[in-house]
Image (cartoon, helix red, strand yellow):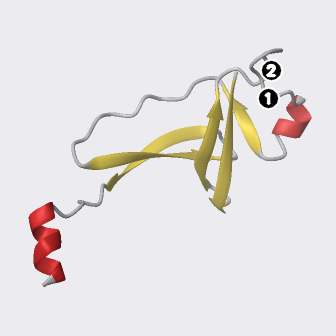
Amino acid sequence: MKYVEFISESSLRAKVVFIHSVPFDPINGLQKSEKELLETGTLVEEIPAASSQPGKDALLYIDPTTKKLWYEYVDIPVKPTTDDELKNRC
């Protein structure tokens, strides 16, 4: 089981903000009961792998009612080059 903590955006959509692969491990776990973990997140069997998309960042979301996980891909902001920064200062 993996633990995912999320911030709800609606009843069917929440952004995953924390993942722990071994939440109940006696040494590396979160040292919380299942009941305590379910107050701020949920337990899932697997986390899907994100695909690599140039210029995009993968954001993980979950449907809290069904525990379905998916990624949404957003553009990574382009940092101006040194030449661009110099032009904007003049």
Q: Residue at x 60, y 47 (%)?
A: 17
* Front residue of this view, candidates 4 and 83: 83
Location of residue 86 with respect to 60 vertically, above or below: below
- Badge 2 element: loop
Q: Position of residue 21 (x, y in %)?
A: 64, 23
Query: Left or right: where does residue 71 sit relative to residue 14?
Result: left
Which badge, 2 or 1, comes first in the chain's sequence?
Answer: 2
Q: Amino acid at mark 2?
A: Phe
Q: Amino acid at mark 1?
A: Leu
Q: Residue at x 17, y 71 (%)?
A: 85
* Front residue of this view, candidates 44 and 52: 52
* Front residue of this view, candidates 74 and 10: 74
- The residue that label 2 is drawn on is 24
Query: Left or right: where does residue 42 sit relative to residue 87?
Result: right
Tell me the CA gap for discs 2 and 1: 6 Å
- The residue that label 1 is drawn on is 30
